[in-house]
Image: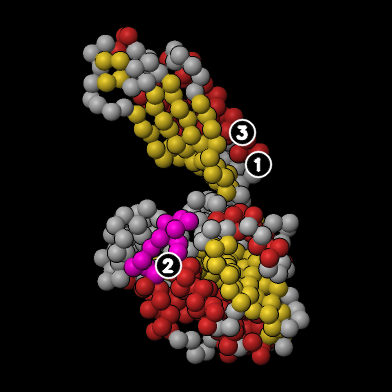
Amino acid sequence: MTSPAARRARDLTADLPLPALEDLYRDLHRHPELSMREHRTAGILAERLRKAGYETAEGVGGTGVLGVLRNGDGPTVLLRADMDALPVAEDTGLPYASTVPGVMHACGHDLHVTWAAGAAEALAAGRDAWSGTLLVVGQPAEETGEGAARMVADGLYERFPRPDVLLAQHVAPGPAGLYAHSPGLILSASTDVDIVVHGRGGHGSRPEATVDPVVTAAYIVTRLQTVVGREIAPRDSAVLTVGRIEAGTRHNIIPSEARLSLNLRTQSAEVRERMLAAIRRIAAGECAAAGCPREPDVTLGAVFPATVNDAETDQRVAAVHREVFGAAAVLDFGPAMGSEDFPHLAEGGIPYSYWFVTSTPTAVWDAAPGADLMDRLAAVPSNHSPQFAPDLSTVGPGVRTLVSGALTELSAA
C-alpha cells in the first residue's frame, strides 16, 4: 500500500519543468564560484525562491541564502543545498563546461542547487497537500568547511524558524538512479594538519653545512604511511593523505624550511586523537634525528565533523524513496570516508537525514572496467575529478527525492 507521502510526492512532481531545470543546471555549471564568492549563484536561487512565494534573505553567513514558506501549523523542515565550486580545471568536454578558468563544479553543487530550486518550487505550487514551515537553504563554502557554521553564527536559527528536522543529499558516482541511505554514520570526520619543518639553509654544493628540511620532510612522509597500517586496528577505518609538500626556490639552494599539508579521515574521536598523536611524534622524531635547529610546527586546520544520520528520520526517508523509486533503487553502502560540514546545521541536536544520489551516465558506467560495483566505482570519474559530469537524467529524480523526503516530515493537509 502506497503511503500518503509517496502519493503526494508523485502528484507534486508529475509535471516538473525539466527543460527549464536542465537549463538552470547548465547555467550554474558554466558559471562556478569558489567558496564565499557564490554571489551569482546565491542571487539566482534567491530570485527563484522569491518568485515561488518564499520570504527570502540573502547574505546569511556571508553569501548564504534562505527561503521561508509558512504554510500553517506543522513541523519545520529544512532542505539544504551547498553552492560552491572547486579550484579545478574542467576536462569534461561538455558543451556547457565551465567558462571560469581553473574553477569547476567538480563536486556537483550546481546540481544540488538545481534540485533544491526545483523542490522548493514544486512544494510551493503544491502547498495544498501539506502544512508546516519549509526552509530552503543555499549554503556557501561547504568545500572549505566554514559555510554551515557561519550561517548558524549569523543567527540562522534566531532570525528564522528553528527546524525540527534537516534533509540534504549529495550527488555521487555510480549507475544513475540509485539512492544510498545509512541510518547512522554515513560520512567520516576530516581534519587538516599542517607541518613546518625547520632546517638550516645553504648552498647545494655544501650540504654538510646545512640541515636539509627537504630530506627530513621526505622521511616524515614515508614514515606517516605506517600510521594507518601499523597503529590503527583493522576494524577502525582511517585514511591519512599527504596532499602537499612545498620547499625551496632554486635547484642549488637548500631551503630553510619545508611545509607539509595532511588530511585525516576518521570515524571515531579515539582514532583521530591516536593519529594526531602519531603525526606529532613522527614529525618531532624525524626532526630530532636530522638535527633540526628547532622542533617542527604542527597545527590543525579545517575540521569537518562526522555525519551521523538520525536512524528514525533516515529510515522514514529511505522508506518513501523505496516507494517512489522502487525497493531495488535504495541501497546502504555503509559509511564513506568523505566529509561534510552539513552537521554544523544540526546545532543543538536537530535530527537529520543525508543521502546520496548516483549520477554516472549509463554509457560511462557500462564502459567502466571491473567485475562488480566497487571495481566500477573506482574506475569512473568521481567527485573532485576534472572529468566529473553527472547525467542530466538525474535532474528530475533529484527533485523528487527532496520533495518526497520533505513530505514524510511535513504534516498532511
Alpha carbon distance from label 3 to label 1: 9 Å
Tell me the crowding category of disc 2: few under 14, some 14 to 19, or many 20 or more residues within 10 angstroms, Cα based: some
Q: Please give the residue where the numbered disc 3 appears in the rendered image.
A: 274
Q: Quadrant of residue 352?
A: bottom right
Alpha carbon distance from label 1 to label 2: 38 Å
Region of the chain picked out in magenta, as a range: 28-41
Query: In the depicted view, which residue is nearer to us: 396 or 302?
Result: 302
Q: Quadrant of residue 209?
A: top left
Local secondary structure at mark 2 = helix
Q: Please give the residue where the numbered disc 2 appears in the rendered image.
A: 40
Query: In the depicted view, which residue is nearer to us: 188 or 123?
Result: 123
Residue 228 % position (x, y): 52, 36
Residue 219 % position (x, y): 41, 24
Residue 235 % position (x, y): 61, 43
Tell me the crowding category of disc 1: few under 14, some 14 to 19, or many 20 or more residues within 10 angstroms, Cα based: few
Q: Please give the residue where the numbered disc 1 appears in the rendered image.
A: 269
Say if mark 2 contacts mark 3, CB within 8 Å. Answer: no
Q: Residue furthest right?
A: 73
Local secondary structure at mark 3 = helix
Residue, x 55% and y 36% (percent of image)?
300
Q: Is residue 230 left or right of residue 161?
A: left
- Residue type, mark 2 in image: Arg
Local secondary structure at mark 1 = helix
